């Protein structure tokens, strides 16, 4: 009851804020994967012209979203009346004071049907970006059709919508009715797209960014890894066009986009190796995309380390087996798994396809294995989930320097205590 009261009060405050400050634009990002990277990429590009507010973390519960939009810190004690009184005092001040931003970029998450639609009861985004429709929270959604219906609900209350042409099946996009819809991606049929002319590990992607509003494409360089990361930059560029940035502002902004911690972030490994740190979370589409990026590298040895994927419900066995089939023995010297479902379903499928595969219960054990067999100049992909996996601890074992540990996710004292408790239980 208390939580519902707080949420309703905050949502009404957001409505009051935009009524008081109609000049402030709102951009929202929804989708099964890639929301946080896309959000930050959009903020990076828009910062070339505008004052931008966004929360870099992806903690976006129904209660915290209004606070993030208003730029107010979430209280440490959610049931503390005194702290909430302080919050609402700050909220009232934010509504009254002159605007301190031009654009707000907000990520909207969902875990069940109806949650995205609820945001439409108090938000009317100027631009909405839909990053993907893929398996997520399948214990609740059950089918991809339900996932699509949930994520694309944002179309019904947004002024303009950008849909990822590469990661959303056309049959879903065909069912939406908003006339102000465009597509983006690396696909030739996408209206906003990036065509790669050259790729090197040192200089990343060089190519042309196309927008239907322009008579000519602009050349730019994207310092990212993987085609799915390109789409993040394209979404950012497309939003920039929608909000009136010039071509030079957009190309400058796109060149400044960098990988986030645990999101396809390239780190230096021991023995002159390359580490692709994609440990923040994991899903079938994200694993496939990360593997494709690993396969593009020209190195003497490639190793893939996978953690069990969460939130797949009854589809977990089939999804893990399908990813095992994606493991190519001509590309991968070793396939390493951490977690029960990865060991039970992914590892056997990878073996059937000819991959040398080993499984561990602890990420530290997996890191030690990679450390033992890592050859000079190799590349290692660490693709893990958050709960009960924590592959960033495996990355630590093979880093070139301990100084780079601050580039990993979940390194706060609170997270480290939680992980230590888990690891202690695994040794009993």
Image (cartoon, grey):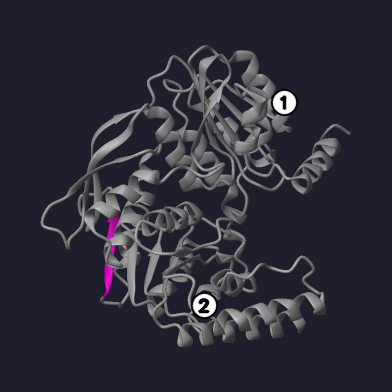
The secondary structure type at the circle numbered 2 is helix
* Callouts 2 and 1 close, C-beta under 8 Å: no
Mark whose residue sits in front, 2 or 1: 2
> Looking at the image, which residue is at 58% across and 35% down?
306
Give the overall secondary structure of the magenta segment.
Answer: strand
Is residue 190 in view from this perspective? no
- x and y, in percent, of residue 421 in the image: 84, 42
146 vs 33, nearest the viewer: 33
- Number of disc labels: 2
> Looking at the image, which residue is at 55% across and 20% down?
356
Which residue in the protein does label 2 denote? 119
Label 2, residues with CA under 10 Å away: few <14, some 14-19, many ≥20: some
Depicted 329 relative to depicted 151: above or below = above
Label 1, residues with CA under 10 Å away: few <14, some 14-19, many ≥20: some
> Looking at the image, which residue is at 34% across and 61% down?
49
Depicted 3 relative to depicted 225: above or below = below
Depicted 13 relative to depicted 236: above or below = below
Which residue in the protein does label 1 denote? 365
Is residue 315 in view from this perspective? yes
The quadrant in which the C terminus is found is top right
- x and y, in percent, of residue 324 in the image: 52, 35
- x and y, in percent, of residue 228 in the image: 39, 45
- How far apart are labels 2 and 1 at the CA level? 43 Å
Horizontal side of 191 relative to 410 (left or right) equals left
> Looking at the image, which residue is at 54% across and 57% down?
136
- x and y, in percent, of residue 195 in the image: 22, 43
- Outermost residue, front direction? 98
Of the image marks 2 and 1, the number of the one nearer the N terminus: 2
Horizontal side of 367 relative to 180 (left or right) equals right
Q: Is residue 182 magenta?
A: yes
- Outermost residue, right direction? 428
Q: Which residues are magenta?
A: 180-184
């Amino acid at each position: 009851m208390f939580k519902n009261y707080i949420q309703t009060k905050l949502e009404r405050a957001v409505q009051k804020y935009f009524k008081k400050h109609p000049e402030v634009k709102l951009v929202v990002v929804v989708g099964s994967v890639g929301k946080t990277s896309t959000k930050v990429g959009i903020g990076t590009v828009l910062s070339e012209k505008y004052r931008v507010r966004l929360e870099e973390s992806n903690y976006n519960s129904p209660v915290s979203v209004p606070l993030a939009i208003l730029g107010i810190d979430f209280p440490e004690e959610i049931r503390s009346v005194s702290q909430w009184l302080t919050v609402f005092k700050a909220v009232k001040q934010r509504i009254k004071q002159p605007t301190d931003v031009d654009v707000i970029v907000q990520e909207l998450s969902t875990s069940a049907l109806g949650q995205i639609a609820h945001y439409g009861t108090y938000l009317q985004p100027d631009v909405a970006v839909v990053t993907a429709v893929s398996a997520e929270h399948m214990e609740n959604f059950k089918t991809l059709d339900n996932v699509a219906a949930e994520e694309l609900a944002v179309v019904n209350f947004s002024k303009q919508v950008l849909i990822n042409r590469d990661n959303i099946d056309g049959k879903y996009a065909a069912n939406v009715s908003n006339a102000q819809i465009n597509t983006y991606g690396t696909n030739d049929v996408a209206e906003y797209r990036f065509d790669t002319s050259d790729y090197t590990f040192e200089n990343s992607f060089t190519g042309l960014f196309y927008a239907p509003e322009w008579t000519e494409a602009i050349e730019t360089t994207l310092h990212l890894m993987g085609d799915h990361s390109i789409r993040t930059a394209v979404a950012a560029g497309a939003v920039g066009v929608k909000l009136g940035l010039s071509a030079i502002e957009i190309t400058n902004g796109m060149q400044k986009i960098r990988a986030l911690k645990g999101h396809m972030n390239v780190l230096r490994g021991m023995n002159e190796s390359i580490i692709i740190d994609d440990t923040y979370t994991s899903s079938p589409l994200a694993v496939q995309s990360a593997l494709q990026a690993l396969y593009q590298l020209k190195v003497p040895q490639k190793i893939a380390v996978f953690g069990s994927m969460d939130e797949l419900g009854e589809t977990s066995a089939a999804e893990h087996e399908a990813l095992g089939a994606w493991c190519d023995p001509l590309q991968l010297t070793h396939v390493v798994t951490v977690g029960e479902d990865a060991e039970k379903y992914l590892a056997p499928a990878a073996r059937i396809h000819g991959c040398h595969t080993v499984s561990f219960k602890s990420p530290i054990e997996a890191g030690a294995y990679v450390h033992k067999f890592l050859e000079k100049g190799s590349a290692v992909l660490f693709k893990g989930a958050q709960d009960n996996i924590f592959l960033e601890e495996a990355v630590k074992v093979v880093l070139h320097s301990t100084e780079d540990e601050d580039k990993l996710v979940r390194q706060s004292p609170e997270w480290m205590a939680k992980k230590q408790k888990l690891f202690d239980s695994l040794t009993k």
